[in-house]
Amino acid sequence: MAMDCIFCKIIKKEIPAKIIAETESSLAFMDAFPLTKGHSLVIPKTHYEKIQDISQKDNADLFETVRKVIAKVDKLTDATLVAVHNGKKSGQEVPHVHVHLIPRSPEDLVGPVHSMFSNRPKMSENEINQIYQKLKAD
């Protein structure tokens, strides 16, 4: 656990949270600063900054908890955005892996994920192929 991590403090019950579900390795709770009604987070109890750092066991538990909690969150509006910011440059505000479960509705005016990015890259077929080869490589 990281001493100054707010999520680690929630796990240790040093900071109160509205806990929805808890397993040996994961914790789900309502976001303290919700974007929509019912916005919740699911986190591993072990401090990891990025998804690729999570142990296989903790990853399986985390996403099983996401699967179970999303069934509850989805009942609020019948549509839920699942989002993970993986690292500071991606917009991650707390450097502890967390999965956002954000109930969505037409009234929130956010739209699909492609509408969230106004500065999309214009790439040549060659650039796309170079990126494809990097992603495909071991």
Image (spheres, rainbow, N blue to C red):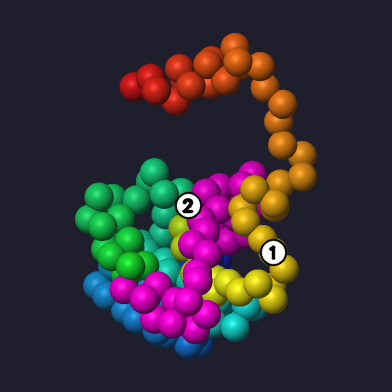
In the rendered image, which residue does mark 1 sit on? 110
Can the viewer see residue 78?
Answer: yes
Q: Residue at x 64, y 44 (%)?
A: 89
Q: Position of residue 88 (x, y in %)?
A: 61, 49
In the rendered image, which residue does mark 2 sit on? 49
Q: Amino acid at mark 2?
A: Glu
Q: In the picture provided, is 69 more to the left or to the right than 61? A: right
Q: Is residue 38 magenta?
A: no
Q: In the picture provided, is 105 more to the left or to the right than 75? A: right
Q: In the picture provided, is 30 more to the left or to the right than 124? A: left
Q: In the picture provided, is 15 more to the left or to the right than 121? A: left
Q: Is residue 86 magenta?
A: yes
Q: Secondary structure at mark 2?
A: loop
Q: Callout 1: 10 Å neighbours few (<14), some, many (20+)?
A: few
Q: Position of residue 77 (x, y in %)?
A: 52, 80
Above or below 131: residue 119: below
Residue farthest along the front direction in this orientation: 106
Q: Residue at x 60, y 83 (%)?
A: 37
Above or below 68: residue 13: below
Q: Could you tell me which quadrant the N terminus lies in? A: bottom left
Start and end of the magenta stretch?
A: 68-96
Q: Residue at x 61, y 74 (%)?
A: 105
Q: Earlier in the sequence, mark 1 or mark 2?
A: 2
Q: Callout 2: 10 Å neighbours few (<14), some, many (20+)?
A: some
Q: Residue at x 46, y 49 (%)?
A: 50
